[in-house]
Image: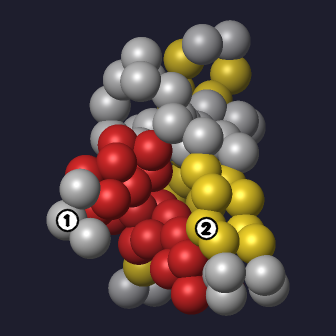
Amino acid sequence: YGTVIMPATDVEIDKPHKNGLEVSYINGEIGYSIFANGKQYSNSFYESKIEIREMMMEESRILYVAMTRAIDNFIWFNNIDAKGNNWGKMLEEMSGEV
């Protein structure tokens, strides 16, 4: 694409998004986590650290695809007040290295 625009880069990528049900299948065991009424319920097979790592790897793949598809311009919106680990912060750090 000539120009790729990343409009929302201030969402924390190392925190689970609280939106219902998450299910994982690891080594023959099914883990689940349910977010309801501001609380998290999960069984003993749900590994939040593994899920966060997988989520960050997927976010990295998405960012890689977006950046490598830009032929002329890659544009992102950076919220300087954003907290935590997010794309905007990583892109800001990388832009100083180029």
Which residue shows up at 46% across the image and 85% down it? 28
Which residue shows up at 56% across the image and 87% down it? 68
Q: In the figure, 32 relative to 56: above or below?
A: above
* Quarter of the image with the N terminus in it: bottom right
Q: SS class of the residue under badge 1?
A: loop
Q: CA distance from mark 1 to mark 2?
A: 16 Å
- Tell me: 33 left or right of 97: right
Q: In the figure, 27 relative to 11: above or below?
A: below
Tag 2: amino acid: Phe
Which residue shows up at 42% across the image and 79% down it? 26
Which residue shows up at 72% across the image and 59% down it? 5
Image quadrant of residue 85?
top left
Tag 1 near tag 2, CB within 8 Å: no
Q: Which mark is residue 97?
A: 1
For marks 1 and 2 on the same chain, the one whose residue lies earlier in the sequence: 2
Q: Label 2 belongs to which residue?
A: 74
Tag 1: amino acid: Glu
Report the front residue among 79 and 13: 79
Q: SS class of the residue under badge 2?
A: strand
Q: In the displayed image of the protein, which residue is found farthest to the right?
A: 1
Q: Is residue 86 visible?
A: yes
Q: Is residue 42 visible?
A: no
- Tell me: 10 left or right of 37: left
Q: In the displayed image of the protein, which residue is found farthest to the front?
A: 72
What x and y, as percent, mark residue 83?
36, 23
- Tell me: 21 left or right of 76: right
Image quadrant of residue 45?
bottom left
Report the front residue among 72 and 60: 72
